[in-house]
Amino acid sequence: KRVSTRSEDYKQGVKILCQDGEVDVTEAKHIIINAPSAKSGDSFCSIQMVGTELPQTETRQCKLVKQIISQERFKDEYEKATSPGDTFILYTSASSKKLELHQPMSAIVSKDNCEEYFGPFAGRCYNYAMEQPNLNEATYTQLTGINCVGEARARIIIEERNKRKFSGIDDCERRTKIPRIYLEPFF
């Protein structure tokens, strides 16, 4: 179910139905993952800010886009997802070098500051946010970082593509003997 991420929409005792049952958002005990294509944020949780009576929400919005995030786009996402006093973080695979944050309690994690935000896990986080790599070009590290492609399968893929590039999924399956279900995300 798609739900609002704005704190003003939740009063004490208001519950929302989640996968494992009803949740009182104001208890600040849960992170709620919103349904796909939700109008506001992708996930949120209630937080109690020092000096405030009512809980606010911390909302996270993820955008897999290639175009630079503009001031207007950031402001639109912020306004859809927050009430005054709420916290908002936009995660994006795009650049945001020229973006100036004018909205209070807001942040952006983009390809420009991903490493600073995620630390030693930055490379893996960024790679998972992007599209699957091309099997004919992916590095050993990229291949082994993908679900169901361990070291042995990565070696087989690299050995076979060094002989000749894969022409498609049928060619890759035939030559590597890797089950088609694991190859489908790449093609």
Image: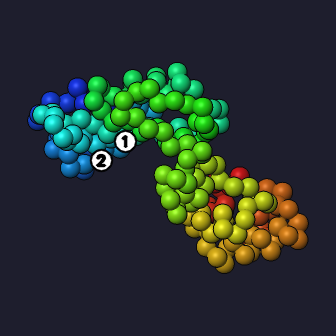
Q: Which residue is labeled 2 in the image?
A: 31
Q: Which is nearer the N-term, disc 2 or disc 1?
A: 2
**Mark number for residue 184?**
none
The percent coordinates of residue 97 (x first, y second) are 60, 36
Residue at x 20% of width, y 49% of height: 29
Q: Is mark 2 on a helix, strand or loop?
A: strand
Residue at position x 50%, y 43% in the image: 109
Q: Which amino acid does label 1 sit on?
A: Ser
**Residue pointed to by mark 1:** 43
Q: Are marks 2 and 1 in contact (CB under 8 Å)?
A: yes
x 52%, y 53%: residue: 116
- Give amino acid for label 2: Ile
| In the image, residue 186 above or below residue 40 | below
Q: Number of labelled discs?
A: 2
For the N terminus, give its image quadrant.
Answer: top left
Q: Is residue 90 visible?
A: yes
Going by the image, does 23 lie left or right of 166?
A: left
